[in-house]
Amino acid sequence: MFQFDKDKRGSWIVFLMFFMTGIAIVLYLNQPPYQVRERDYAYAGSFYMFAIWIGLGVYAIYKWIADALKGREKVVAIGTGVLCLGVPALMAEENWDDHNRSNRYTAVEMASNYLNSVGPNGLLITHGDNDTFPLWYAQEVEGIRTDVRVVNTSLLGTDWYIDQMKWACNESAPLPLTVPQSQYLYGTNEFVTIQYDDGSPMFLHDVMEVFKDPKMKAVFEGGGKYDFICARNIVMPVNKENCLKYGIVPEKFADEIPEHIVLTMSKDKNYLSKPEIFLLDLLDGYNWDRPINVLNQGGDLNIGIKDYLMYDGFSYRFTPIKNKISSTDAGKVDALQLYEDMKTKYKWDALKSSGWFVDYQNYYTFLGVMGQRQLYLTVANALIDAGEDEKAIEMMDLCEENFPESNFPLESISIGFSGNDWMVAQMIENYYYLGAQDKAHDMAVRMTDALMEAASFYIKWGGLGANEFETAGRVYLYIADVCKQYGDKDLSDTLNASFDALLKSAQ
């Protein structure tokens, strides 16, 4: 067995701790270079060990100089300290701009918009840390919309969090949950199978009563007995009066409110997760008297609610009216209310301000995860469908103003968000369609210049840049076709000629 030299054992231990909490953890975790947030805490032990070595090094320098200049220890100590300040000074100079958070208020502004998309005393169902932490800060520190209950599906697999949902919090009322704690304790009903379903619809209350009944168990091979859900088509009654009273359904859709809705789960779905069971329990006691909004169209909650969502800009409201929503099509929506919300309810001051460092995480969030151009485009499309052309143009103008190119580039293939580029291309098409030729032409020129620069870069890398080049080329040529379709033939011809020249130069 390997033996440590006793005199050097301490040094070996320090070295191994430095290695295991630094290089080894990097290899073990295999983290990609871009993270949703800084992961420095994963290397805290490594930093501690590195600091120990720094301290030993400083003392060594002091000792060498002090031995050479006996009798001048104070001068040596001061001189050594000044010399060693060069290290942190260099680190600060090189890293300050990358870590500078001055004047950056985008997180709390986005949290405010999320919360304000929900009606009074409503629920906002989130799906992870990045959705949730800014909301908690906004509520607990800034005091923003403390009547909204944040419900994080990532935590709904834990008993303590479900317990918290039964309590009042700030100005938010408790949730009407009835499943006993014994059925959601840690390790219990993490996944609940669907059994004995013959396709017949059943009332939600009856389904939950069967689930909660201690005598009703599904028997599995080996003799194990488990709770189960007995239907995939679940009927939920609707309180029409409350839907209108509490703003869950706009008055313009009052005649479309049914007596019941059916939450339909796929035939391929064989089990429900604990968060999905939680939501069924919540809906069982729900009287349509407080809005329920979800992010990301419900995320992993696949119990049929995605068929009943109405677009609120920053979130989606659960309603009793069937709807079909896509990335830029809001489907059935109150377009004029959305227009007013975008102008008066939601804030954009932090996004459009200058003087702050827009880093990769901001690009990731506002171009990718929660694309602001997509939000404006979706609202503009809803206004076009409603025949409000002037307001649609105004909405896209506001996008340029509130989400400026100086902070968030039009072309973002190089940073991995080609979806943003397609949003810009569709905005150009909308401008042409609505008769705003000058605005369409100007944006098309700016966008295609950026796309040509990207394509010219990636074509030089051959196979390594093939995907990026192909994406840039598709968006570029799409814009060229749009220009031609709407009579901007000179620009279309120029764009096509430039792209042909690029291809020839690479042959």
Image: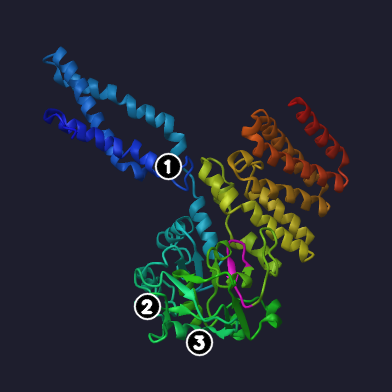
User: What's the amino acid at mark 1?
Assistant: Asn
Q: Which residue is mark 3?
A: 206
For image coordinates 52% across by 42% down, the residue present is 360
Splitting the image into 4 quarters, where does residue 465 fall? top right
Q: Earlier in the sequence, mark 2 or mark 3?
A: 3
For image coordinates 23% across by 20% down, the residue present is 79
Q: Is residue 351 left or right of 72 when viewed as pictured?
A: right
Q: In what quadrant of the picture does the N terminus appear?
A: top left
Q: Spatial distance from mark 3 to mark 1, Cα to Cα?
A: 48 Å
Is label 2 in a helix, a strand or a loop? Answer: loop
Q: Spatial distance from mark 2 to mark 3, Cα to Cα?
A: 26 Å
Residue depth check, mark 2 versus mark 3: number of the one nearer the observer: 2
Is label 1 in a helix, a strand or a loop? Answer: loop
Can the viewer see residue 237 in this picture?
Answer: no
Q: Which residue is mark 2?
A: 223
Q: Please state the horizontal and vertical placement of residue 467, each as a whole percent of the image.
A: 65, 39
Q: Earlier in the sequence, mark 2 or mark 1?
A: 1
**Label 3 neighbourhood size at 10 Å, few (<14), some (14-19), many (20+)?**
some
Q: Earlier in the sequence, mark 3 or mark 1?
A: 1
Q: Which residue is mark 1?
A: 30
Q: Spatial distance from mark 2 to mark 1, Cα to Cα?
A: 42 Å
Q: In what quadrant of the picture does the C terminus appear?
A: top right
93, above or below 255, in the image? above
Can the viewer see residue 260 in this picture?
Answer: yes
Q: Please state the horizontal and vertical placement of residue 266, each as a whole percent of the image.
A: 59, 71
Q: Is residue 67 left or right of 80 when viewed as pictured?
A: left
229 drawn magenta: no
Please state the extent of the stretch shown in magenta in the rendering.
311-320
For image coordinates 41% across by 86% down, the residue present is 213
